[in-house]
Image (cartoon, helix red, strand yellow):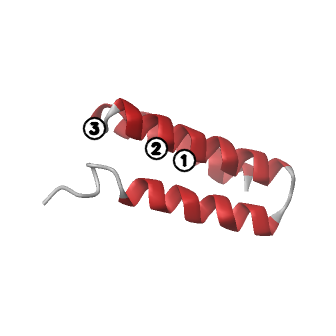
């Protein structure tokens, strides 16, 4: 799980220029939550953090382009 959080951080770096600063802060906060949950080895907390991360991504301008 911690490796997954690290991978998401690398992907975040690749999309950083394509989202607004507010969206990037939201994504960063969700990645931090995911990393904390993974370090705690709490599967329920990880699942919640993943859902929150997914919601943050869906709300970005990157995902809403047509």
Q: Which of marks 3 and 1 is nearer the N terminus?
A: 1
Residue occupying the point 64% across, 48% down: 5
x, y percent for residue 13 = 44, 34
Residue occupying the point 66% across, 41% down: 32
Label 1: element kind: helix
Residue occupying the point 84% across, 62% down: 42
Q: Earlier in the sequence, mark 3 or mark 2?
A: 2
Kindly identify which numbered label has been placed on residue 8. 1
Relative to 31, say whether 25 is above or below: above
Residue bearing mark 2: 11
x, y percent for residue 36 = 77, 45
Residue 14 visible, this orientation: no
Residue bearing mark 3: 18
Label 3 and label 2: CA atoms lie apart by 12 Å
x, y percent for residue 33 = 68, 47
Whether pointer 3 and pointer 1 mark residues with C-beta atoms closer than 8 Å, the reply is: no
Name the image quarter holding the N terminus.
Answer: bottom right
């Amino acid at each position: 799980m911690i490796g997954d959080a690290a991978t998401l951080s690398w992907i975040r770096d690749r999309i950083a220029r394509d989202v607004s600063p507010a969206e990037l802060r939201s994504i960063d906060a969700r990645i931090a939550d995911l990393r904390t949950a993974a370090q705690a080895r709490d599967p329920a907390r990880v699942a919640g953090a993943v859902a929150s991360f997914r919601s943050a991504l869906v709300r970005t301008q990157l995902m809403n382009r047509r």
